[in-house]
Amino acid sequence: MDADDLARFGEATRAADERRALEMAELYEAAGLLAEVTRAVATLANHLQAEAAALPGRYILRDDTGDDPGARLAEIRRRMEQMVELLQKAELHARRSHAAIGHLGVEIDPAAES
């Protein structure tokens, strides 16, 4: 993902916030961006999981509640692992939705309200 993709994703989320009707090309692009962003977030979650696992080798850790820092790290790793799994499933559905939208042909309905 690059800055242009992020800008287009921001535009798509603004359109969603405004409940603005999308043209077919915008719908197709937004679905593709959703798949890309979901893939990128899964990659980030996977990296955070690895970074959390590496923390004890770089820092002396303490838990501000007095609990075991190792238990906190294990929780982080479990949660990130679950996030990665869920995000990968979401990305698959986003890609398949993007592909399905791409197979739709459209015509302008003259009777439809604009």
Image (cartoon, rainbow, N blue to C red):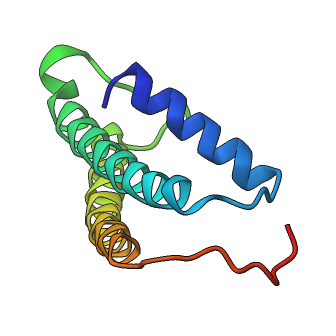
Where does the image place residue 63, in percent across and percent down from the top left? 45, 32
Where does the image place residue 23, in percent across and percent down from the top left? 62, 59
- Residue at x 36%, y 67% (from the top left corner): 98
Q: Residue furthest front?
A: 110
Q: Which is more toward the observer, 69 or 98?
A: 98
Q: Is residue 45 left or right of residue 18?
A: left
Q: Is residue 94 above or below residue 22?
A: below
Q: Is residue 15 above or below residue 113?
A: above
Where does the image place residue 110, in percent across and percent down from the top left? 76, 78
Q: Which is more toward the observer, 88 or 71?
A: 88
Q: Residue furthest right?
A: 113
Where does the image place residue 41, in percent across and percent down from the top left? 36, 45
- Residue at x 81%, y 80% (from the top left corner): 112
**In terms of image quadrants, where is residue 73?**
top left
Q: Give the mark count.
A: 0
Quick one: quadrant of the C terminus?
Answer: bottom right
- Residue at x 63%, y 37% (from the top left corner): 11
Q: Residue furthest bottom?
A: 111
**In terms of image quadrants, where is residue 92?**
bottom left
